Structures are given as structure tokens and as C-alpha cells.
């Protein structure tokens, strides 16, 4: 089913377009909203209103009365650096920017939004560098690299090849646009890129949480967890995530100890906090996706200066997720360490079954390294304000930096979770495991036949996809 812009978008729809190339459409009534906004903008201009970026220059140069060139705005703001970001990030940003403009507050022509949609449907992906946004006045650098494509400038990825945008547009039968200054600024003065990157992180985290809880049964069986502490009926606190997590854990029976270590006994509480944090961030992201993100906005009363380009909500939400991921990493690393304690598993210490062997000891070293790096990346990004444009733009959110590092953290966390799986496998022979756990055990055993730890960890990573 096609994804419609201009009404309401959810993260799942962003994922469908970004990763699975779902078609994007724009209903006729949405086109009418865009045209109404364009008419109101032109009327305000005819009345002689001062409109930022149209009758003035930009940033601290707002005091300069001029009519900037749309092309110049894009060229001067395309200052990003670093490696080209993943295709799905750019596609998500294209969709969100088209949707936000289609809400009818920016005064652009319908053709501008339709061309963004064409890029998605004809699989043209602007080449966008990773660094350069401060998350206020929008993601200016990244969105400028996207917007350059509309005028036939810059580079794109098409059919797996890097091409000049002008050539790609010609091959796909798309006419380059001649953008006026309002349209050029509307394309770049928003949070769409930060929001896109965070939306995809939320989706990745939700899937990984679910997989981790599904596979935790192998760990719980290996350590002989006391199920009474984990059972759903035990979770009487009011935080919804605790009960939800407990309900996702598979019953493995048994229980060797009255009080298990926290890394065993407190899974519903620790992962429940992670679960609830992700839910809160999902709401923030979807509110941002479905909000105008521009300056100025166009209302029936005329042009209004705003700060709707500011990414503070996205930055703080990304920081919350980073802290949640670090808490999760702490849990998994400690669980891995508990698996190496003979008094917990009933096996030899470090699972060293032969004289002269250190067993699985070194897996925990790698786990410790990964957990330490994840913790370092969890440091808040939203507090690192550096003013720009003189003293005019003096409080910036760093929302894109905050969102991007989540994907780095997730890549590390996936390795950590794979170590946890391998050591769980080694700590039990799965006698009398529940059927789903026994199936996981056999699959892991088949995947991890190598005797080299790094190869086993890599192979176990297949479980998370």
C-alpha cells in the first residue's frame, strides 16, 4: 500500500519508504493545502511584508535588505563533510521533508513537493555527508545537499552508482527546478534529517529489544534463574514496560537461588525502563514528523517568524535513547560475566572444561570493551551548544549528532548481544529446554561451529536480523 504525505505519518511508514521502496503519493486535497499556502505567501509579498530569507539576507545578516537567489542559498549552505550516509537515512529525510512541506505552512509550489516525491519513487538518492548540522536553523547542510538535486547540482546514488544529479534527473525524466528564495529556504530550514535518523534508530531498537527478550530464555536457562522474580504476575509496579517485558520472557522453570544477582532478577525492571524510554521517544519523533518545521511559516494572517526549525526535542529524545542503550549494555555485559561464574551455572569457572584452557574468559574482555565504548557514546550531545552566525543563532541543539551516534551504539550493542548469545550457548547443553529455546540452541550451535571466538560472534549476529 502506498504511503500518503500531507496528513499523518508514522515511523512504520517511514521505514517502509526508506528501506523497502514503498511508493509515495500525495492526495488532491493535500495539493490544495500547498497551493493555498503558496497563494497566502504571494499575497503577503505583494502587501510588502518583510519575509525572512525573501526580502532579507540570512542569519545575523537579516538586517541586510535583499532578495537572495534560491540557487545561491543552496550552494552556500551545502557545507557538509564526511562519508556519505546510508541510503535509507536520505530516503527517510526526503519523505519527512516532503510531508512537512505538504502540511501547508511553507509557501512553496506543489511542484517542489512533487519533485521530492519523484526522487523517492524513481529511486534517486542524493549523496549526503554525515557531518555539518548543529540542529538549529534545521539540518541546513544535509538538507542543502538533498535540495541541490532538485536544481540539478551535486551528486546522487542511482542504481548503485554515484552520478552527477543533472545526469540522473535527465535519465529519469525529471526537470530541474528553478527555486525562488522562499522555496530554497523551506527545503533546508527544518529538522527533517535529524528526525529521519532518529526515527530509523527507534525502529532498530524496538526490533532489537524484542529479539533480545526472545533469546534471553537461553541465558535464563543456563543460569538457573528463579522464575518467581521474573513472572508477569510479580510485576506490580505501575511502569507499563516492566509488565510488558516480563510477558515477553519465555518461562524456563526451575530456580537455584532465592535471590538471583540483579543482572538476572531485575531484567523486567531494567529492560522495562528501556522499553518505556523507546515508547516516549517514538511519540516525540512522530510529533516532530507531523509538525511544520520551517522559518517563517505562512498563516492566513501572513508570514510569521518562528523557531520551528529547532531540534531540541529530537536532541533530548536521542540522548534519552543513548542512556537507555548504555543501561542495556551494562546489563548484557554483566549477564555475560555471570555466565562465567561456576557458582551461578554449575559449570567450571569461565566454562574452562580442559586443563590449560581459559574457556570463554576472553569473550567477556571484548564485552567489557564494547560496553565501555557504548557508555562513552551515551554522553549527552544536546548540552554541547556552540553559537553560530555571530550571536544571532546562539543556542543550538546538536540533534543530528545526537541521533547519528545511536546507530554507532546499536552496531556495537549488536556485537555485545552476540557475545552474550555465544556464552549462553556454551554454558548449557539445553537438556529439557522449552521448545522455542531448544530451537534457538540448535540454530546457534549450527551457526557457531568455528573454534575462533571472533568468527563465532560474527556468526551469532545473524540472529538479530
Image: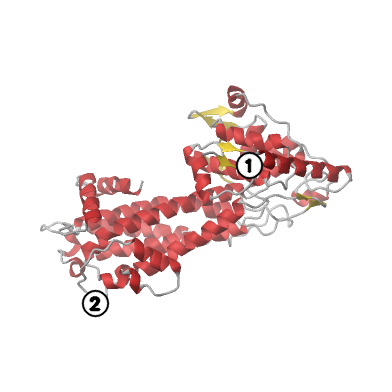
> Which residue is disc 1 drawn over?
98
| Residue at the extreme left | 355
Of 255 and 416, nearer the camera is 255
Q: Is residue 367 above or below residue 107?
A: below
Q: Is residue 393 above or below residue 125?
A: below
| Residue at the extreme right | 47
**Of the numbered discs in the image, which one, if any, rests on residue 26?**
none
**Picture coordinates of residue 50, whole percent (x, y):** 85, 48
Q: Is residue 337 above or below residue 75?
A: below
Residue at left 53%, top 45%?
14
Of 158 and 282, nearer the camera is 282
> Which residue is disc 2 drawn over?
258
Label located before the other in sequence (1 or 2): 1
Residue at left 39%, top 69%?
269
Can residue 292 be seen?
A: yes
Label 1 secondary element: helix
Question: How far apart are labels 1 and 2 at the CA level?
Answer: 57 Å
Tell whether 75 sits left or right of 11: right
Can residue 82 be seen?
A: no
**Picture coordinates of residue 77, whole percent (x, y):** 67, 42
Residue at left 56%, top 61%?
316
Tell whether 465 sits left or right of 252: right
Label 2 secondary element: loop
> Could you tell me if the residues under marks 1 and 2 are in contact, i.e. CB atoms within 8 Å?
no
Amino acid at each position: 500500500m502506498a504511503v500518503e504525505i500531507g496528513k499523518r505519518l508514522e515511523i512504520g511508514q517511514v521505514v517502509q519508504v526508506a528501506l523497502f521502496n514503498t511508493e509515495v503519493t500525495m492526495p488532491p486535497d493535500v495539493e490544495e493545502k500547498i497551493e493555498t499556502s503558496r497563494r497566502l505567501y504571494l499575497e503577503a509579498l505583494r502587501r510588502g511584508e518583510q519575509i525572512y530569507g525573501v526580502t532579507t539576507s540570512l542569519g545575523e545578516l537579516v538586517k541586510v535588505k535583499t532578495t537572495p537567489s534560491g540557487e545561491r542559498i543552496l550552494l552556500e549552505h551545502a557545507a557538509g563533510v564526511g562519508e556519505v550516509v546510508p541510503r535509507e537515512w536520505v530516503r527517510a529525510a526526503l519523505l519527512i521533508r516532503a510531508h512537512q512541506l505538504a502540511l501547508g505552512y511553507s509557501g512553496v509550489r506543489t511542484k517542489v513537493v512533487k519533485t521530492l516525491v519523484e526522487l523517492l519513487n524513481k529511486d534517486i538518492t542524493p549523496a549526503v555527508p554525515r557531518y555539518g548540522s548543529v540542529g538549529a536553523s534545521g539540518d541546513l547542510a544535509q538538507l542543502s545537499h538533498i535540495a541541490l538535486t532538485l536544481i540539478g547540482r551535486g551528486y546522487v546514488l542511482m542504481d548503485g552508482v554515484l552520478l552527477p544529479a543533472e545526469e540522473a534527473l535527465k535519465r529519469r525524466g525529471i526537470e530541474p527546478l528553478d527555486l525562488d528564495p522562499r522555496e530554497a529556504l523551506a527545503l533546508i530550514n527544518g529538522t527533517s534529517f535529524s528526525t529521519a535518523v532518529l526515527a530509523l534508530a527507534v525502529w532498530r531498537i524496538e526490533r532489537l529489544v524484542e529479539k533480545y527478550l526472545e533469546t534471553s530464555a537461553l541465558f535464563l536457562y543456563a543460569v538457573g534463574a528463579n522464575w518467581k522474580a521474573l513472572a508477569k504476575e510479580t510485576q506490580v509496579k505501575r511502569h507499563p514496560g516492566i509488565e510488558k517485558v516480563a510477558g515477553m520472557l519465555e518461562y524456563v522453570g526451575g530456580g537455584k537461588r532465592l535471590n538471583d544477582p540483579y543482572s538476572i532478577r531485575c531484567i523486567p525492571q531494567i529492560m522495562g525502563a528501556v522499553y518505556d524510554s523507546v515508547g516516549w521517544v517514538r511519540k516525540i519523533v512522530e510529533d516532530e514528523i507531523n509538525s511544520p518545521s520551517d522559518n517563517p511559516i505562512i498563516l492566513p494572517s501572513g508570514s510569521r517568524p518562528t523557531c520551528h526549525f529547532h531540534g531540541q526535542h529530537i536532541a533530548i529524545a536521542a540522548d534519552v535513547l543513548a542512556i537507555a542503550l548504555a543501561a542495556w549494555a551494562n546489563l548484557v555485559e554483566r549477564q555475560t560475566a555471570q555466565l562465567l561464574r561456576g557458582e551461578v551455572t554449575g559449570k567450571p569457572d569461565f566454562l574452562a572444561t580442559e586443563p590449560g584452557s581459559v574457556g570463554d574468559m576472553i569473550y567477556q574482555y571484548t564485552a567489557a570493551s564494547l560496553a565501555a565504548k557504548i557508555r562513552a557514546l551515551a554522553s549527552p550531545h544536546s548540552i554541547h551548544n556552540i553559537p553560530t552566525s555571530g550571536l544571532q543563532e546562539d543556542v543550538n541543539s546538536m540533534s543530528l549528532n545526537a541521533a547519528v551516534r545511536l546507530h554507532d551504539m546499536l552496531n556495537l550493542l549488536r556485537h555485545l548481544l552476540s557475545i552474550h548469545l555465544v556464552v549462553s550457548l556454551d554454558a548449557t547443553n539445553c537438556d529439557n529446554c522449552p521448545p522455542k529455546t531448544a530451537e534457538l540452541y540448535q540454530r546457534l550451535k549450527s551457526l557457531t561451529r568455528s573454534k575462533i571466538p571472533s568468527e563465532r560472534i560474527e556468526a551469532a549476529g545473524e540472529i538479530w536480523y
